[in-house]
Image (cartoon, rainbow, N blue to C red):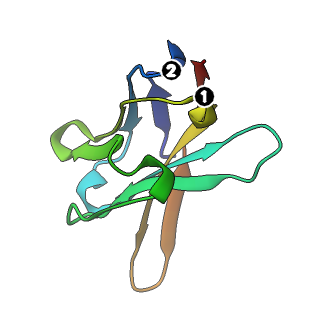
Amino acid sequence: QVQLVESGGGLVQSGGSLTLSCVASVSTFSLYAIGWYRQAPGKQREAVATISSGDHTNYVDSVKGRFTITRDNAKATGYLLMNSLKPEDTAVYYCNINRRSRYETYEYWGQGTQVTVSS
């Protein structure tokens, strides 16, 4: 069973920075796309940033220029560097990895880590 272990969340003041990490227990990590999602109270979960197996990245408009998604395949770890944090970034952040073979889709989620930005 693949497990994703997230860390790095916490309480930070507006304008501060945090780096989230997601360690995956999978040997074929380099084949997976990675996504960071967040869910604020009373809101739907939204995709914040994604990085493909080929290192192509995408960001939701609200975090462009502030967040950076990266990966280290040797460590089976994905990262989300968050700078210039705002109170509206407060949410539970979830890591997702996914890949498709010819016949199956593989997708796994982390347990979530709380990010709270105070004004």
Is 53 above or below relative to 9?
Answer: below
Q: Distance between the residues labelled 2 and 1?
A: 6 Å
Above/below status of 50 relative to 119: below
Q: Are marks 2 and 1 in contact (CB under 8 Å)?
A: yes
Give the tally of numbered discs: 2
Element type at mark 1: helix
Q: Please tell me which residue is depicted at 39% across the width and 57% down the height of the picture.
A: 50
- Residue at numbered disc 2: 14
Give the residue pinned by disc 1. Answer: 87
- Image point 49% across, 77% down: which residue? 104
Q: The residue under label 2 is which amino acid type?
A: Ser
What amino acid does circle 1 point to?
Pro
Marks 2 and 1, the one that precedes in the sequence: 2
Question: Residue 101's x, y, as percent?
Answer: 39, 78
The secondary element bearing badge 2 is classed as loop
Q: Residue extending furthest bottom?
A: 102
Residue 112 in sight here? no
Does residue 115 appear to the left or right of 33 in the view shown? right
